[in-house]
Amino acid sequence: MSFISDSPSPPLPLWKRQRHERLLTAAIEILSRQPAEDLSMDQLARAAGVGKATLYRYFEGREALLRACLEKVVADLGQRIEQIEESSLPPLTRFQEIVDCMTRVFSQHFLPLRMLMRSQNELEESWRQSVHQARMTLVSVLQRNFERGHQSGDYRAVDSELLAHLVMGMIRSGVTHVSSRELEGLVAGITDYAACGFAVCSPRQARLSGQRNSSAMASPEVEKDENVKG
């Protein structure tokens, strides 16, 4: 699954990859606190503890740096989602895990992603295409989940593309209104509300059913204890 580009660059020596990673980590951390348009190469060089000349050996300019930041965030998210997709979990469980993964990554990196996308007026067409490709790849992950769930009988027939866009919208909107401490509730809310429209048995219903089954299994033992006491 390719989230940004199907033609990777030639591999760098290990020490260069490690330095490249440190520079990107420093840039993304800065972007979490300020708009992308305010990030300067001087600021990043100081934060990373390198000379400006060194910085330009890794990135041709600020635009190349911003694009690399976006690629890193999306690639990291892609790797996590691929692991979920390759698992043998039931479709609804995979859906919950994918929503959880997207929500936490969007929450951690939402500001840099949002600011990078807002800066499209200064970016070339290839950048805009990369942003669009990244979003559509995430949408396609959700679509596949809905389609696989329908084939297995776990989901009702739905417009998978429309529903995927709606779920993406809920995630992106939700992370702007809740704190990092409230993400678990946000994930539960999104999966519950979405699943009401497509799942044969929603997560909430499954939890209630599990509680009822547990109570039913416990009842004979309770009655037995009471009979012994009597």
Image (spheres, rainbow, N blue to C red):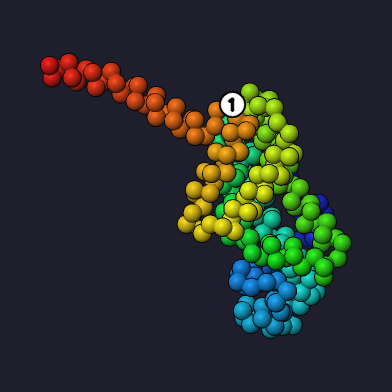
Query: For mark 1, what is the residue?
Result: 200
Look at label 1 and name its amino acid. Val
- Classify 13 as above or below 90: below
- Residue lying at the far right of the rendered structure: 125
Residue at 67%, 59% in the rendered image: 73
Foreground of the two, 194 or 120? 194
Determine crowd level at label 1: few under 14, some 14-19, many 20+ residues with C-alpha closer than 10 A: some
Q: Position of residue 181 (x, y in %)?
A: 47, 57
Q: Nearer the viewer, residue 114 or 80?
A: 114
The answer to which quarter of the image holds residue 12 is bottom right
Label 1 sits on a secondary structure element that is: loop
Against 151, residue 193 (above or below) is below
- Image coordinates of residue 107 in percent, x first then y, are 58, 58
Residue 12 visible in this rendered orientation of the protein: no
Residue 114 rendering spot, x and y as whole percentages: 69, 62
In which quadrant will I find the N terminus? top right
**Residue 106 rendering spot, x and y as whole percentages:** 62, 56
Q: Is residue 197 left or right of residue 224?
A: right
